[in-house]
Image (cartoon, coloured by chain):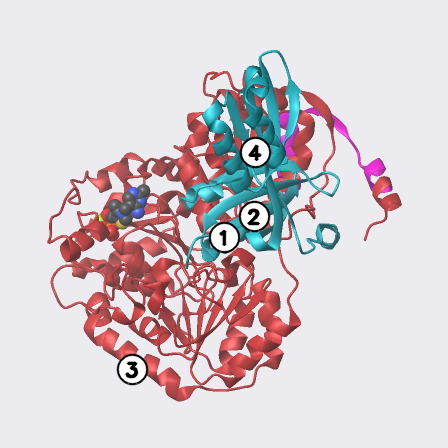
Chain colours: A cyan, B red
């Protein structure tokens, strides 16, 4: 079986130790977590983990089974990229002078559909959301001018199909 | 469903008393029906021990000589009684000493609640004396764990701990209680836990799957059952027997499933796995339908997966959804409690007798008997064999004893040759293979089934891993029978060295102390035998004794356990020598 990108979505109670339990499941199988995001979900008091891993379907099935078995986990799913709408966000911190001296920077921001979040005397910050490759491309374009800081978030995603968590919660 | 109003009323009428967290903990344990627990005190758990002192006539605490012993004793207790085993320890080293037992209980699905003391809340994260992150350490080896930092959390968390440990697929739970939470006073009341919103312990059986399973069973020409501990944990022994008999299906067991069906039952064809019986292993690759019941296709059972039962359709009766398709693809998966699902399948099954197919197992048994079993249990050579010792124990106990085995050759021999007429009789460390398990587990097993005879079968190596628990046997006069099968080697490892490492016996030759003297040091009646002429009478004497009894049997030093499926080989490649 070939490795593919999978997005694992975990609906859970908000619990101190759960992140440790979930990451331990990957650790035990020597599988790397490529990105991880924890947030609230569409349901009150229910958290959502969005985890990206590059592995085989057999392993992702195994992992999701083990995750779902954790007491505080309500439901876990895995999806391939074409089954989800997904994005990442990035922030670029750039020296302020460049914004005025290098016309090209303004074009990069416009062409990439990015926003300037803040401008101060010393630096300005550009925010960009999108697919990882889009963010990477923008990174490559800005790099020659000098990037003071760069950060990219974990993937967040919603599925094209329904997840029906409220219904599952009623069933328990 | 309880209405909100009713619920309100029941909480109003609940009486609350003002107690310390430590006392509350004792009330929780009593409310959960705990009678005996195993543990070891220390600074961070002293308030609880102070309450154990006050409640000693209601709750027995057994001081094991090492916290590992406490976990295995709790496991032995749980495995024979079906109740939740309880172990307790202090923070730091006390807590870390529980880890092996937790891992063992996790992989063998044993219901256990471990309680650890923790440094006071204000000191958490300061590297305080005996502070260790036992929640972090125990996470991968517990079904659930939780750190209590306020007394008021104790009732709800303890109720949840017991509920989680014993429901669904059972397992170990660890509750870590900071010292301040043991001391603080609060208004205590207790309500048992009956549900956790995010936890669904058992699935409702799916009627389509039940029907599909029945159809496959009814149309199979060469059906074969392999059952595991799920039958025992699900209390489905009667249903298993009814299925086997009604459909005339030869049935084999994993070591965790042993004793769920009488070993003498004509359709019980023996054990599967690395040192299992010849027939069941070979026939796994001959059957047209493999019916797996409450087992998880461990690699010690399946051998090389690519060549495991590929010709057969597979039905998997299982409580844990994560086990379905984990190692072996199931054509039909029947999720649920084994008693319930087997009970539903039974009326849909046609009566049958697969006589010719069953005869195949008998032929294989004959081959195995002539080449191996005969020499193991009725040897003609001078030296004593492990097999004949087990056989004498069968005879002297009328197949009624609980056999608690350690890990190694003697374990495989005990599992192969012990005869069982009652369920919950084979207590061994299956999934983890924990040397040192048997002596403390036997103590727990005896205390969990005082009316039963408990015989521990231990190797000279493993015995020395938890030998200090003789202290418990001595102090409480626990009438267990301890049999050390002394081959002066770490036999199982030596066997692999002989077969796969050209007899380079690296660190497997044991230089042993005088085991009889050690037992005598604990005032335990002790004997050593090395000749066949003494075997029967000594074993009879041991089984007749009402006291603890230690017996060392000097057995052949370089005997091997066969049949054997070398690791990584297919079940079809089972070796007779
Ligand atoms: C705690 C632990 N350490 C190491 C092992 C590896 N191991 C498996 S069997 C065995 C030898 C056991 O020797 P002994 O207790 O004398 O039993 P025998 O095989 O000789 O019957 C060893 C070292 C283990 N299973 N558990
Ligand atoms: Mg030995």
The span shown in magenta is: B9-33
- Label 3: few (<14), some (14–19) or many (≥20) C-alpha neighbours in 10 Å: few
Whether residue B29 is in magenta: the answer is yes
Question: Where does residue A110 sit, x and y in percent of width and height?
Answer: 63, 33
Residue in the picture at 48% in, 62% down: B325
Q: CA distance from mark 1 to mark 2?
A: 8 Å
Q: Chain of mark 1?
A: A
Contact, CB < 8 Å: mark 1 with mark 2? yes
Q: Is residue B43 above or below residue B114?
A: above
Q: Quadrant of residue A48?
A: top right
Residue with the mark numbered 1:
A60
The answer to whether B317 appears left or right of B252 in the picture is right
Indicate which label's residue lies in the foreground, 4 or 3: 4
Residue hosting label 2: A8
Mark 4 / mark 2, whichever is N-terminal: 2
x, y percent for residue B323: 50, 58
Mark 4 highlights which residue?
A153
Q: Is residue A137 left or right of residue B454?
A: right
User: For the residues tagged 3 and 1, is the chain the same?
Assistant: no
Instruction: Using the image, name the chain to which the residue with label 2 belongs.
Output: A
Q: Circle 3 sits in a helix, a strand or a loop, which is it?
A: helix
The chain under label 3 reads B
Q: Dot 1: what SS? A: helix
Calculate the distance from the C-alpha at mark 3 to the C-alpha at mark 1: 43 Å
How far apart are labels 4 and 3 at the CA level?
A: 65 Å
Quarter in which the C terminus of chain B is drawn: bottom left
Discs 1 and 4 lie in a common subunit: yes
Is ligand 1 within 8 Å of the beta carbon of the residue shown at mark 1?
no
Number of the front mark, 2 or 3: 2
């Amino acid at each position: 079986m070939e490795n593919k990108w999978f997005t694992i979505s975990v609906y859970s109670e908000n619990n101190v130790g759960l992140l440790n339990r979930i990451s331990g499941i990957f650790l035990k199988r020597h599988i790397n977590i490529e990105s991880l995001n924890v947030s609230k979900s569409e349901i009150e008091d229910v958290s959502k983990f969005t985890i990206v891993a590059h592995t085989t379907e057999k392993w992702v099935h195994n992992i999701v089974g083990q995750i779902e078995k954790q007491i505080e986990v309500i439901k876990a799913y895995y999806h391939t990229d074409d089954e989800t709408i997904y994005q990442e966000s990035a922030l670029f911190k750039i020296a302020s002078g460049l914004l005025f001296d290098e016309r090209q920077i303004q074009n990069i921001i416009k062409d990439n559909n990015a926003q300037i979040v803040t401008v101060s005397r010393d630096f300005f910050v550009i925010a960009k959301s999108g697919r990882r490759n889009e963010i990477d491309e923008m990174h490559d374009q800005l790099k020659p001018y000098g990037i003071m800081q760069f950060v990219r978030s974990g993937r967040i995603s919603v599925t094209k199909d329904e997840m029906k968590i409220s219904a599952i919660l009623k069933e328990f | 469903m309880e209405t909100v109003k009713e619920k309100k009323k029941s909480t109003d009428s609940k009486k609350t008393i003002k107690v310390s967290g430590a006392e509350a903990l004792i009330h929780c344990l009593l409310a959960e029906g705990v009678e005996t627990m195993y543990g070891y005190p220390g600074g961070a758990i002293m308030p609880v021990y102070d309450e154990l002192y006050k409640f000693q006539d209601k709750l027995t605490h057994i001081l094991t000589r090492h916290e590992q012993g406490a976990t295995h004793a709790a496991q032995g207790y749980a495995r024979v009684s079906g109740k939740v085993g309880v172990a307790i320890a202090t923070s730091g080293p006390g807590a870390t000493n529980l880890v092996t037992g937790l891992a063992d209980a996790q992989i063998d699905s044993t219901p256990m609640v471990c309680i650890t003391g923790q440094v006071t809340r204000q000191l958490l994260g300061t590297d305080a004396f005996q502070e260790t992150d036992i929640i972090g350490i125990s996470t991968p080896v517990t079904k659930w764990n939780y750190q209590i930092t306020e007394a008021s959390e104790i009732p709800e968390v303890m109720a949840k701990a017991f509920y989680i440990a014993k429901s669904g697929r059972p397992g170990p739970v660890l509750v870590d209680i900071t010292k301040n939470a043991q001391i603080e006073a609060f208004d205590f009341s207790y309500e048992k836990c009956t549900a956790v919103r995010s936890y669904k312990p058992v699935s409702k059986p799916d009627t389509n799957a039940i029907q599909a399973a029945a159809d496959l069973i009814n149309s199979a020409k060469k059906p074969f059952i392999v059952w595991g501990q799920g039958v025992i944990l699900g209390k489905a022994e009667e249903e298993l027997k009814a299925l086997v008999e009604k459909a005339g299906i030869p049935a084999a067991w994993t070591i965790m499933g042993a004793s769920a069906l009488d070993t003498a039952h004509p359709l019980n064809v023996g054990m599967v796995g690395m040192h299992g019986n010849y027939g069941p292993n070979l026939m796994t690759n001959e059957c047209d339908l493999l019916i797996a019941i409450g087992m998880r296709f461990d690699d010690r059972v399946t051998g090389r997966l690519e060549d495991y039962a590929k010709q057969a359709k597979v039905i998997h009766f299982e409580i844990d959804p994560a086990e379905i398709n984990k190692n072996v693809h199931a054509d039909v998966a029947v999720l649920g409690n084994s008693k319930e699902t087997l009970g539903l399948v039974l009326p849909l099954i046609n009566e049958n007798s697969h006589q010719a197919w069953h005869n195949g197992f008998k032929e294989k048994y004959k081959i195995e008997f002539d080449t191996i079993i005969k020499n193991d249990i009725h040897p003609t050579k001078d030296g004593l064999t492990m097999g004949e010792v087990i056989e004498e124990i069968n005879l002297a106990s009328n197949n009624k004893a609980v056999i608690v085995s350690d890990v190694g050759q003697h374990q495989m021999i005990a599992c192969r040759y012990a005869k069982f007429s009652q369920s919950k009789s084979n207590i061994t460390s299956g999934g983890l293979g924990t040397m040192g398990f048997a002596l403390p587990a036997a103590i727990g097993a005896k205390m969990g089934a005082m009316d039963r005879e408990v015989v521990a079968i231990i190797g000279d190596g493993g015995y020395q891993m938890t030998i200090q628990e003789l202290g418990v046997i001595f102090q409480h006069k626990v009438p267990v029978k301890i049999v050390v099968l002394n081959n002066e080697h770490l036999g199982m490892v030596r066997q692999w060295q002989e077969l796969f490492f050209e007899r380079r016996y690296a660190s497997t030759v044991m230089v042993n102390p005088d085991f009889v003297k050690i037992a005598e040091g604990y005032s335990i009646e002790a004997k050593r035998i090395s000749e066949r002429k003494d075997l029967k009478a000594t074993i009879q004497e041991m089984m007749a004794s009402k006291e603890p009894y230690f017996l060392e049997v000097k057995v052949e030093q370089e005997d091997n356990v066969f049949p054997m499926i070398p690791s990584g080989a297919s079940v079809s490649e089972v070796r007779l020598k």
